[in-house]
Image: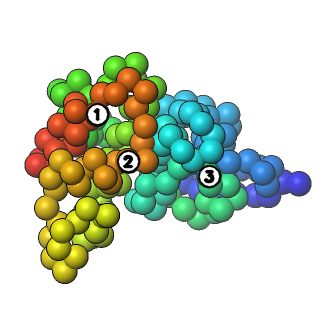
Amino acid sequence: MTVDVGLTVNGAHHDLKVDTRTTLLDLLREQLGLTGTKKGCDHGQCGACTVLIDGVRKNACLNLAASCEGREVVTIEGLANGSLHPMQAAFVKHDGFQCGYCTPGQICSAVGMLAELKRGLPSAVTDDLKRRVMALAENEVRERMSGNICRCAAYPNIVAAILDAAGRA
């Protein structure tokens, strides 16, 4: 069974006919050719497929394409606008990657995480839940990014990149 889906991906609107079982990840990679978003575990456990849906970080492997009707999706390809996004530049500056497989998901997740922080959303390690402006320390970054796995263990550099980008945001 197929369904018509209209969604905006990286600023471009697409009207597509998709199988009702198609995930957003498969739509991005197989129908739109946006292969920056990676298929890691395909079970929502590794974070390699993290994208932004209406500005919120989500695992593309867990979201059906049909559920994205009318939504705006931003992938790693859509973050750069003529030049590298500040988070992408920080990952390059701090060598926040080794093999690079998880990097697109790490970067999209980090961008979404900083947006959560700006909205005042606490994490499990936030010390003062009443504070309107959340402080971004290493323990906050590590907790908030815990859904994104790096097999190469580049975590110290990833944390440094996020802290650097947060200072410039």
* Image quadrant where residue 152 sits: top left
Q: Residue at x 49, y 54 (%)?
A: 58
Q: Could you tell me the amino acid type at mark 1?
A: Tyr
Measuring from the top left, give residue 141's x and y in whole percent.
25, 50
* Residue 101 visible to an observer of this rendering: yes
Measuring from the top left, give residue 38's x and y in whole percent.
53, 33
Q: Is 55 drawn above or below residue 165 in the view shown?
A: below
Q: Could you tell me the amino acid type at mark 2?
A: Ser
> In the drawing, does residue 103 fall left or right of residue 25?
left
Q: Closer to the N terminus: mark 1 or mark 2?
A: 2
- The residue indicated by pointer 3 is 62
Q: Nearer the viewer, mark 3 or mark 1?
A: 1
Q: Are marks 3 and 1 in contact (CB under 8 Å)?
A: no
- How far is mark 3 from mark 2, CA to CA? 17 Å
Choose between 57 and 135: the one closer to the eye: 135
- How far is mark 3 from mark 1, CA to CA? 24 Å
> In the drawing, does residue 72 fall left or right of residue 63?
left
Question: Which numbered disc covers residue 155?
Answer: 1
Question: Which numbered disc covers residue 75?
Answer: none
Within-10-Å neighbours for mark 2: few <14, some 14–19, many 20+: few
